[in-house]
Structure formats: structure tokens, C-alpha cells
Image: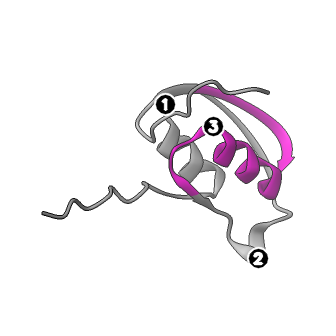
Amino acid sequence: MAVEQKLNPDALIDLTVKGADLASLGRLFASVSTAEVAVPAMELDKSVTLSLKEVRLDEAAQQAGLILRAPDRQATSD
């Protein structure tokens, strides 16, 4: 899947996943999101099944078991 522009964590998405492992789902979220994505090490092989409509990307990630962190904004210096 090619993504032209990455989504912010507050973007509304629809997500349907059936039996995907959390590691693969983490890779998917990392490829479409501006946020940093972490997958808990003890949950890498966890099977995820979700059907979500019009939810924020960060909420969908949380429901799946992923951790999203918004990217740091660059500090400006004078």
C-alpha cells in the first residue's frame, strides 16, 4: 500500500483487521502515521481482530495494543 501523505494521530480512520499479529499491525501504523509506533515486546505475536469506524488513528492504535507517540516538534533557536 502506497501512502502519499502520512496521517496525524488525530486523523479519523476506518480499520478492519482479522487475526493480524501485532508486529505486522505496528509496521502498518508506522507506514501511514506521522507518529512513532512502539509494539510491546511481549505482545509481538498477539493476534488482533478489530472492526472500527470513524475513530482517531491514535485511539485505534491503543485499542490494538500499540503505543503511539507524536513526533517532537523541532525547537527553534534565535
Quadrant for the N terminus in the image: top right
Sequence-first disc among 1 and 3: 3
Is residue 54 at least partly visible in the picture? no
- Residue 27 versus residue 45 in the image, above or below: above
Q: How would you rate the neighbour count of disc 2 (Cα within 10 Å): few for under 14, some for 14-19, many for 20 or more?
A: few
| 22 in magenta | yes
Q: Give the range drawn in magenta.
A: 14-36
Residue beneath the point at 77% across and 35% down: 17
Is residue 69 shown left or right of residue 19? left
Q: Dividing the image into 4 quarters, which one contains the C terminus?
A: bottom left
Q: Is residue 52 left or right of residue 21?
A: left
Give the mark nearer the N terminus: 3 vs 2: 3
Q: Name the residue under label 2.
A: 42
Callout 1 secondary element? strand
- Numbered badge on residue 4: none
Q: Tag 3, which secondary structure?
A: helix
The amino acid marked with disc number 2 is: Met
